Image (cartoon, coloured by chain):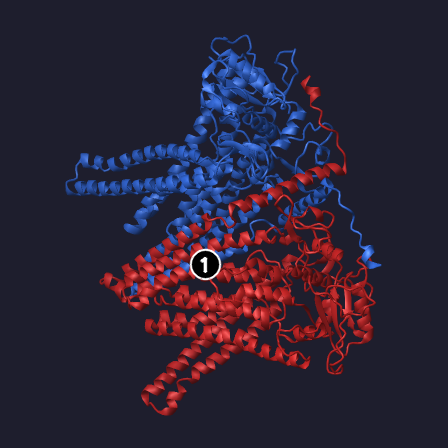
Chain colours: A red, B blue
Amino acid sequence: LMISLSLLEPNKTPFTPLVVMELAEDTNEEAVTWLTSRIKDTQQSGGAELMIDRLTLDDNQDPKKENQNIFIVGASRERLLVGAEDVGLVKEFNDGSMRGFTYANRENFKGFQGDGDNFLSMAECQFIVKHELDTLRARGETHVPGYPKIRLYPGKSVVRRIQSKGILVQIFPLHDKEELKRLSSMWYQNVQLSFQPLDDIRHYFGESLALYFGFLEYFTLAMVPMALIGMPYYLFDWEDYDKYVLFAVFNLVWSTVFLETWKRFSASLAYSWGTLSRKKAFEEPRPGFHGVLGINPVTGRQEPVYSSTKRQLRIYLVSVPFVLLCLYLSLCVMMVYFSAEGLVLGLHDEEPTFWTSLLLYVPSIIYAVVIEIMNRIYRYAAEFLTDWENHRLESSYQNHLTLKVLVFNFLNCFASLFYIAFMMQDMQLLRQSLATLLITSQILNQFVEAFLPFWLQKRRNKRVHRRSGKVSPDQELPFDQQVMLEADMSTYLGTFDDYLELFLLFGYVSLFSCVYPLAALLAVLNNVTEVYSDALKMCRVFKRPFSEPGADIGVWQLAFESMSVIAVVTNCALIGMSPQMKSYFPDSETQLILVVATVEHVFLAFKFILAFVIPDVPRHIQIKLARVEFESMEALKKKAVGNRPAPVPDLTKEKA
Amino acid sequence: LMISLSLLEPNKTPFTPLVVMELAEDTNEEAVTWLTSRIKDTQQSGGAELMIDRLTLDDNQDPKKENQNIFIVGASRERLLVGAEDVGLVKEFNDGSMRGFTYANRENFKGFQGDGDNFLSMAECQFIVKHELDTLRARGETHVPGYPKIRLYPGKSVVRRIQSKGILVQIFPLHDKEELKRLSSMWYQNVQLSFQPLDDIRHYFGESLALYFGFLEYFTLAMVPMALIGMPYYLFDWEDYDKYVLFAVFNLVWSTVFLETWKRFSASLAYSWGTLSRKKAFEEPRPGFHGVLGINPVTGRQEPVYSSTKRQLRIYLVSVPFVLLCLYLSLCVMMVYFSAEGLVLGLHDEEPTFWTSLLLYVPSIIYAVVIEIMNRIYRYAAEFLTDWENHRLESSYQNHLTLKVLVFNFLNCFASLFYIAFMMQDMQLLRQSLATLLITSQILNQFVEAFLPFWLQKRRNKRVHRRSGKVSPDQELPFDQQVMLEADMSTYLGTFDDYLELFLLFGYVSLFSCVYPLAALLAVLNNVTEVYSDALKMCRVFKRPFSEPGADIGVWQLAFESMSVIAVVTNCALIGMSPQMKSYFPDSETQLILVVATVEHVFLAFKFILAFVIPDVPRHIQIKLARVEFESMEALKKKAVGNRPAPVPDLTKEKA
């Protein structure tokens, strides 16, 4: 933790700034005083026991223009270590095993030296501070002081309440300029042939994001063989379906193996990062979780309790029908689009004029706009529904939300391709559409997502630097201006969109691989630039996100696996539809279909057997996990004895 | 433990007889002395610390005729309780949770009263004694005393060695006449409409067998709706394929739901019996497991260690190819049989005489004999291979063996039915074959398996009673004669054949359900009598088997689930082949097949989603398991502190 806070008022204990809380400019001073005192209060009296200070802005800025209600939050080293225990951080123990960190036992953990200065990474400290702020719960207060209308109920999260009511504008962790510079030079600044520094990414951004970059890299590498094998098909214009069959078979087997081995690789990563050993059932509920205050049956802690039956009912009686209805609607819209296009095409064929040729584009444009609107409305509804389902854990919330948005996006992206492939059976058009989609999405996405915002951010940086009198943008800004600069950066909304991009890419590559072998090559090229653009946007464009502990890529694993199952079906169907295959069975189409169906079933069975046979967690990690579990059980046995001393077994009596 | 052993020599401590060891009649007395002393030795000096005594035979029997080397093994109450800890018994704790039993903490377990007299069931005691005998390992001895040729190596199981060399003829647990009487009256003696007393069965025979009977009952009940719905098809001679489709759909959904809910039910049973919480990784290796003596990386105990890579290589490079080869051979034999039958049928059609009509039966008979021989050879080979694979755990050994034998039996039983259904497309013949198979297997199996042996055993009992001068067979025999009687009973070889029977039955019912709806009714009838005949054979025909802890039905769950997946495919195909379906698509067979294939895929997807969505363990049990795990983790945290006292966190310093 390298930044020292010399800029804060000298009569207070200096502390390392970790998290910024921006309150609304017109916040009632009474509320500010109440909030800061609640945050400073000891844990015994229900506070968060953190350190908080108002950011003092430099003189050369016009105080009227800037928000004066920006607060810096930090914590003492001891408080952070105690907090590490609260959030259930898992660290490497002296004996090489991964164990839940405890303050009392801190000196037995590897890397704990002196008073534990560098034991926790800054990202971990910020995560701890965030957790402590989130779990700051209302006690006696009936409303936020100064705001009689904003009611508070005992046990509700204070920070969440004032955030939803607009008093808290934003809360974000600060970047660490020094470390960021080191990370970027290792990560993306020099074009180099090496793996990404995943451990460093995790150190700076947390496990979830590091897993995303790990997956991105793994996925890219896994597609290299496909791309290499696919190239000659394009170069030599192979139209031979025998070869396509070979390619498709390779792809199907390969994608299964790659998804299974990824699970093992990610388990290794998560183990070494301590997140594989975290138990979901032991985690504290996410701040948005609400319910009657009760006792958690597993941990015995006091927390909101909500019936899982109710949640199931909400999911199966409301959410699932709603999603199905939306999917149906989306299909209807697509059918309308196709018939409109047919109509327009008919008009144009009948009497081709300039106007009809313009008219040809109208259905596509309207369809694109409608889809975009539907997408936004649907996403809003999905978020609302998932929130309403009231999941206890953040990971469970994310998985349910992701799944909802995912199926809708899948349908919108692939339904038209399926229509072209299986209804129109126009392979030329399919190939064209795939190429267009792959190339435009690659260029557009990376431009809109990373390079444009990067350029805008750079301009803003320059402006701030100029205003503060620094000539070079490399020079360090004063602390207050750095905070203001970061407060103005846009917020990273999570890995969903990044994963979705990869997922759709995987779909383009695998679903129609036997028709368009070049897709894999394009995907590899896309991913290589994606690594750089994503790295750039994380380091330069966005506010630093709070680190999120994650043991795997969650529901995305399921999504990719489902896609590879669907790919078996589509590829078999495409090969079965090829003229060359048909020429092998000139007399009977029935027999052709039966052969294709049999082969497909064999493939599916093979995939499931493969997935069943390859263990998800490597053996040496299974053993390490089992060892800790064994030691825990032994400790429990001994502890129970300690509670009530029992006589030592006296076996000598019987032997005599 | 009700039998008191007054018949043993009066100058020794009396103990409850639990297990019988029969040594060969001509065993060298030196070996006998050595063995008994090793069994009696204290654990510190490497013995089993059990009690053992030679069975003294009553005078009125000719001592020359009976084997004098029959030994009764028992143990002191304390030794059994310590042994319960060794084998990892899980019992209900005072607070209602299930915990690993420890001797030191014994008084905190529910049902432990006084000196713990009735805390362990007789079956558990016998299991413990068996375990202690099995883990009696060679120390300094280079060979069995008196047998210089039977070498011993440090760490090898002594009992297993002398058993494989024929010195130990058999080892079995004793029946408990009183309890057996109580159990049989509750279980099968009175025809009654009630569930089986599963808890009592478990108490007497152990978890594995109780789970078998639980599954048998569950399976039977689950088939009742199918049977009821299937009846009108037979009564009213419905040949309407619409109705068959309905029936098939119901069956497919039902079988998925029933298999999923069984998993939940069996988890509840296993939880209340304490086997669900047993961790496989913590179990001791099975006696047949061999390897270099090393340290178990999980438990830290000294035991044989064997590389899992080597085992994998043996499985995938030897066992799998061997099994595939055998399956192929078996298919070849079937093809030869079908062509032979075609040949004979041709001969008979050409010139029908008495001899040719006799000749008609020859291929079937030869085929049946060949299959039987192949089955036996294959089973022997499978056992050899699985043994050679050197699995560490008994459950893993059983699963691998079962899987091997299973696929072979599946092929032999169903290949000809598949041939009739899909190659010959003769539904009448299929129905006939199914009916024949169902009815004959039912009658034959239960007669050969239970009633015939029961009758033979009864005759033997009477003979023994008469010889010992008791007139009524209800009178109790003297202890020594009871032991001799049980020693002569046949040995129960495990649940494999019983499960296999159910598995094949499930196949007959589900694979062709849309062709022969009556199958479910026949299966229900079969199962109802099966409960009685199996109960009878366990209680009256066989030696008592050693109890085996089991948390689920192992690989059988997988087998039944796979069967229900295959059933989706076969039923869709059968419906697609029906004339009525064909008449719906008079112009294009292709379209029919595509429709059927689509429906099939939807069904398969539905099945997998259903299996994914229904949790395998009921929520309230998940919570209980998580609670113990949480407490263990907390105990581990505290224990680590205890090892090296760390200063108490001093947060006041910073606050001041």
Q: Closer to the camera, A165 or B275?
A: A165
Q: Residue at x 32, y 60 (%)?
A: A245
Residue B149 image-quadrant placement: top left
Q: Residue at x 69, y 27 (%)?
A: B117
Image quadrant containing the N terminus of chain A: bottom right
Is residue A622 positioned above or below A82 on the image?
above
Asked whether residue A152 is in view, the answer is no
Q: Residue at x 36, y 32 (%)?
A: B376
Residue count near mark 1 (Cα–Cα under 10 Å), binned few <14, some 14–19, many ≥20: few
Q: Amino acid at mark 1?
A: Ala
Does B118 sit left or right of B411 as displayed?
right
Q: Position of residue B445 (x, y in %)?
A: 41, 34
Q: Position of residue A100 (x, y in %)?
A: 66, 49
Image quadrant containing the C terminus of chain A: top right
Is residue A329 positioned above or below A77 on the image?
below
- Chain letter for mark 1, please: B
Does B351 sit left or right of B519 as displayed?
left
Q: Closer to the camera, A343 or A35?
A: A35
Is residue A61 positioned above or below A85 on the image?
below
Q: Residue furthest right?
A: B656
Is residue A656 positioned above or below A70 on the image?
above
Q: Position of residue B61 (x, y in %)?
A: 51, 9
Residue, disc 1: B605
Q: Residue at x 51, y 59 (%)?
A: A557
